[in-house]
Amino acid sequence: MKLSGWGRYPVVDCGTAALRGPEDLGGVLARRGTLIARGQGRSYADAALNRDLTLSTLGLGRMQAFDADTGVLTCEAGVGLDDILRTFVPRGWFPPVVPGTKFVTVGGMIAADVHGKNHHRDGTFGAHVEALTLATADGEVRLCNRLEHADLFRATLGGMGLTGVILSASFRMQPIETSFVLAETVAAADLDAAMAVFEASHDWPYSVAWIDCLARGRRLGRSLVLRGAPMRRRALPAALASRPLRPAPEGRIRMPVDAPSLLLNRWSVGLFNGLYHRRGRARPGPRPVHFDPFFFPLDRIDGWNRLYGRRGFVQYQCVLPASESAAGLAALLGCVSVAGQGSFLAVLKRFGPAGEGLMSFPAEGYTLALDLPLRRGTLALVDALDGITHAHGGRVYFAKDACCRPERMREGYPQHAAFDALRKAWGAPRKFASELSRRLEL
């Protein structure tokens, strides 16, 4: 079967199988060749692709236990974040960390050790995982936590499925009084102003910025910084107070066909960015916003990746150390602006300290994410961006990466040698691999 990530590049002809339950694992692991687990396929490039065998975990979709006293939810790895939200928000609970889409699985959230708008305060999703069960290369299922198989636990957080197949996990949910966020938009005239807003917003639980990546000169890095905090019930306006824990609205806008690639050019993106910036400045807030559009604005469009045309797109995401962020971000944005490959989605976030996963992406500093339509020159541009990132001591996100060089990966992830050694100790290289791990020589 031909498979791709969410960016629709690369497309790989993969052998496929599906787990209906943990009992299927013995036969799957006994097959010759390597495999990689795959959930809803929302990593962007080749992280969840394996030519030998790509193993769907969507059959592992059962919620197993919930402790209302501690907030600990135990579920199988194929459970979707959307199912968790649908089930628990009306009951007054919310996941501790959510990525930019709710159409991901718990196993995928652990494998990528996802981050959200609250990383500066709450860290990655892995920081809230109490335990997980992992099928290793020898066919055994092992309980991993911070006491038992702690080394395997740390390697699995952010390990992109390369330590084994995650079967289930237990993690802490957080109580909420409402399903609304008090949101405020702050317009920033340039990159320095945007970073100043972030540094002044540490007490806000959530923060993220949209950047006009085509702005140049004195306007380089002009942004809209969105800040938010969970709303208490007593703070809701009367129109919302009667139903404070309302779920996400049903229904989505469907993108039925691939958009013509000619629609995405410097002028159309520039026009969109200008209008979007003016609209954001006109709605500063603070105002109540339902959690769904606040955290997952693009999920309302079913198949929004088709907006980038049949050839797909590459998402480039990097993190730069705090001391290098100002210079590095200016260089990255300047490179994109000069190339004229503007993006509708240019997102900036402030990260807190690095987490415990050996190969987890976040580190103290700033992270920039860019969607770049795939066309002539795009991969060369991404390579140039990668060069800037690594010149400033940064690294790329495996869940988004499409073309990082192995030597740059090794420079960006100083614990890769420990990760490799642990994989070898558990026999993982002979059984677990992906097109990403082959490309990066992991």
Image (tube, helix red, strand yellow):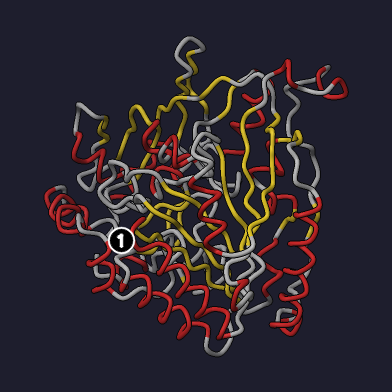
In the displayed structure, would residue 177 be above or below residue 127? above
Which residue is depicted at the point 37% across and 75% down? 388
> Which of 162/412 is in front?
412
Give residue 221's position: percent from left, percent from top. 58, 67
Give residue 246's position: percent from left, percent from top. 76, 26
Give residue 338's position: percent from left, percent from top. 56, 85
In the displayed structure, would residue 159 be above or below residue 388? above
Q: Is residue 313 left or right of residue 238?
A: left
SS class of the residue under badge 1?
A: loop
Residue under label 1, please give it. Answer: 433
Query: Where, quadrant-wise, is the C terminus in this rendering?
Result: bottom left
> Which of 246/202 is in front?
202
Q: What type is the residue that disc 1 sits on?
A: Ala
Most extreme residue toward the right is 239
Which residue is depicted at the point 56% across and 58% down? 193
> Which of 145/282 is in front?
282
Q: Is residue 223 left or right of residue 50?
A: right
Which residue is depicted at the point 40% across and 62% down? 325
| Quadrant in the rendering for residue 141 | top left
